[in-house]
Image (cartoon, rainbow, N blue to C red):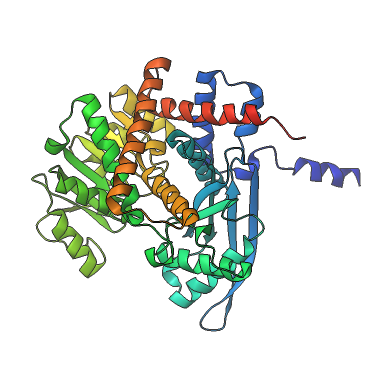
Amino acid sequence: MATDVQAQEGDQVGPGDEWGSELYRIASNQFDRAGALLELEPEFVTRLSQPRRALVVNFPVRRDSGEVLGLTGYRVQHTLTMGPTKGGFRYGADVSLGECAALAMWMTWKCALLGLPYGGAKGGVRCTPSTLSAGELERLTRRYAAELIPVIGPDRDIPAPDMGTGEREMAWFMDTYSQMMGHSVFEIVTGKPVVLGGTTGRREATGLGVVYVTEAVCERIGLDIREARVAIQGFGNVGAVAAAELYAIGARVVAVSDATGGIVDQDGLDIPAVARWVADHGTLVGYPEAEHVGPADVLEVPCEIVIPAAREQQVTVENAPRLRCELVVEAANGPTTPEAETILRERGILVVPDVLANAGGVTVSYFEWVQDHQRYTWDELDIQERLRRQLRAAFGRVTDAADRLACDWRLAALSVAIERVALAAQMRGIYP
């Protein structure tokens, strides 16, 4: 019996190991570095280094064939100190508790940096959405929403779109929650269709925000964005919007890619023509009048600005020495590993961190949530101007902190955010 007890004790999961994943390692590494720079008190390291709450759900979904599919879903809330939590939910084959924990932590820092009254959250369902019909995805979304009822609410935790989800899924989610409450609750999610309480400009917000931040950075370093060559990895909602906006203001977009491959033209791609091709064919494959390369090869195209707008961990120790640019603007979450960032820093390549660069989405989500509560809508120009001001103010806080702490922009951004959350935690104390 003693042997059995020892074996059970030896199998216990250590503190923080619940979240074990490479992405969470990266998020924790960043937090540790910023905490050390700030000389953060041990109390706040304890309170902020791990998520406060997590829910793992296993549930069945009936397929069109009648077969029952067993799925696993997650919702992680990083901190409850700043107000309700906020963050998207995603559908993907590699969604995990550790991935959601890392993304929830980053969302906390993103909201704090932008001055939004939220803690960070993230969720998702491990599945392959491309193999599911619209009816199956609806049943999946509604069941996932029902499973999350104990931890979500318009003033508790407000989900939003992420990879594999969009306005359609938000409408299903909102309707499911509303049916359970007995009345319409538009503010339970953001990223909804406009007719259901969504806001104009939300779909384009992240990509547009990337451009606003890039403009501010270029002004700071003396780079004329209208003369710059730009390579963008990812031609989905974020990358395509950023490419179109950069093309419209005169930048030369020399490379873009999607999951199937990339295209390169050093004279500059005709982005409206590329967008029409993708709309007609669903992929960049076969696009004429451009050199075709691999999806990750566009990161190594000679240019001034590289924008990773695809998945996590795309700039690594393997390809970081081969990047030929002045600036990396992280439109995706966690696209640069800590080891790769060290290489870029040594090579003099500036990195604009994700918590700033792609914060346009959560900022306009906040605007949508406020409008839903007020039952009053703002026009698109108002949304864009508010977004520009908010992002530029956040960039100013980052550069001020970088000068004060003599550090890079990532550490500066994280330091601003962590200081804000730690101060709030100190003021609230510990209950009981």
Q: Position of residue 187 (x, y in %)?
A: 51, 58
Q: Position of residue 395 (x, y in %)?
A: 35, 30
Instruction: Determine if residue 176 is in view.
Output: yes
Q: Would you say 40 lies left or right of 138 here?
A: right
Give residue 215's quadrant in the image. Answer: top left
Q: Position of residue 173 (x, y in %)?
A: 52, 65
Determine the residue positioned at 50% across, 62% down. Answer: 186
Determine the residue positioned at 49% across, 72% down. Answer: 138
303 up-or-down from 64: above or below: above
Specify the farthest residue to the right: 1
Q: Would you say 278 lies left or right of 27 here?
A: left
Instruction: Determine if residue 22 is in view.
Output: no
Which residue is more in the foreground, 397 or 344?
Answer: 397
Determine the residue positioned at 63% across, 63% down. Answer: 147
Q: Which quadrant of the rendered structure holds the C terminus?
A: top right
21 up-or-down from 58: above or below: above
